[in-house]
Image (cartoon, rainbow, N blue to C red):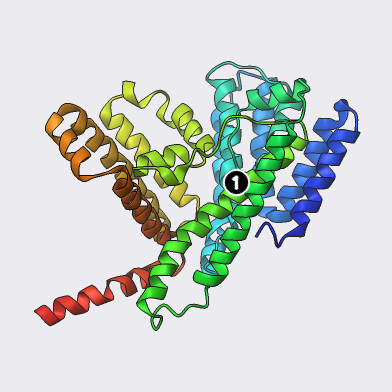
Amino acid sequence: MILANSNNWQFFTLLSLCIVVFPKQLKVPILCLFGSFFIYFYSPISFYLYIPFILFVIGLSIRKNLIQLHLWLGAFIAYFLALNYENFDHYNSIQMFPFEVLVLGFYNLIRCYHVFFEMYFQNKTFKVSEILGYLFYPPILFSGPLERIEEWIYYHNNSTPRDWKRAAYLLGRCLFFAILAEVFFTQFTSPNLDIKTAPYTSILLYVYFTGLVIHFRLAAYIDFSRFFSILMGYPFKRPNFNSPYSSKSVAGFWSRWNMSVARFANDYILFGKITTMDKKKVASAIVFNFLVVGICHGLNLSFVLWGGVQAIAVILNFMYLNLKHKHIKLLLWDQKFFSSKIKNVLTLTFLHLTAVLLDVRCFDIFQALLAPFANLLQLNG
């Protein structure tokens, strides 16, 4: 995807040159111009959806005590529902939901929410130019990391030496992940594979590599955007990945994978540290978080199931961890029979199996996977 689309490379190279060459006073107008073009080019509908929310947070920055706040929110809900067909139903009808629409339609809207939340509930003040520059910042528009507006403002106002070593590392990792994703996609997860007649080993490979393709593509997108962000003088330094494939639990994986999303969920959905919260509140927040993420892939039952399954797995992880701390015998039993390697294999197996729910043919795939066991049960019966 990244390797095949030369427009992305040309776009961000030109943007980086403009940011470096033109005076600092022109940075925000340049970002707004390029950001608007970028959104409209990838998804005109997302552009029409994004603009009113930006106008709303700008209005809030000008007039903190918006008396008619409920009217604004009602208008945006109506606006969203009016475009629901183009945003979700249309893509479901053609059995595809492009990654770009997920990024532009979900991540960027909740960045508007992040700015709104801090201004309205935490009484923070931002300049109109800062809000515009942050919300139209193309590297974040492209990949979706939810870096804070305060971080963006810091780098915008303070010149920092470019870390060429880190930039080269991110570029190399981006290309490596992108190549792996495309090789795996063409060799193992081709949409031309006939699930009903394919050998069982081919289906197993399809299931395993589907998860890898999804994960490597997203990692490549984020490394790509962070590489160009460094070139532009905005070197967001908080990690977005922390060796997720070495995780020993599903909860551990999601705390290491796309960490900016986990940070956002912690600050704006959980509203605090899990260890200090009521158990029911933690469970409900986790379910809500993953269901929202699943739905934002598209209004499809399989996407909702994917989010629900991830939430249940994370909650069970926390429950098991709590039991181990309370019962020393369970802890010793766990250490004796479940090595770190076994936990890692079980975690990755679960993640790759459930990633199939993001595939349009997921139910056919699961039926094919279960077919030999069903036949075996019939024979024994």
- The quarter in which the N terminus is drawn is bottom right
Identity of the amino acid at label 1?
Tyr
- The quarter in which the C terminus is drawn is bottom left
The quadrant holding residue 25 is top right
Residue at label 1?
79
Residue 56 in picture, x, y percent from top left: 65, 32
Residue 376 in picture, x, y percent from top left: 18, 77
The quadrant holding residue 281 is top left
Task: Locate residue 269 relative to residue 47 in the image: left or right.
Answer: left
Residue most extreme to the right: 22
Give me the residue at 42% from left, 56% from top.
303
Residue 197 in picture, x, y percent from top left: 39, 84
The quadrant holding residue 335 is top left
Residue most extreme to the left: 381
Give me the residue at 22% from left, 73% from top.
373
Q: Is residue 139 visible?
A: no
Give me the residue at 69% from left, 46% from top.
171
Task: Locate residue 84 relative to residue 10 in the image: left or right.
Answer: left
Q: Is residue 179 visible?
A: yes
Give me the residue at 72% from left, 25% from top.
155
Q: Is residue 121 above or below residue 202?
A: above
Taking depth in this image into account, of 339 and 145 the one nearest to the observer is: 339
Q: Is residue 90 above or below residue 176?
A: below
Taking depth in this image into account, of 215 and 336 the one nearest to the observer is: 336
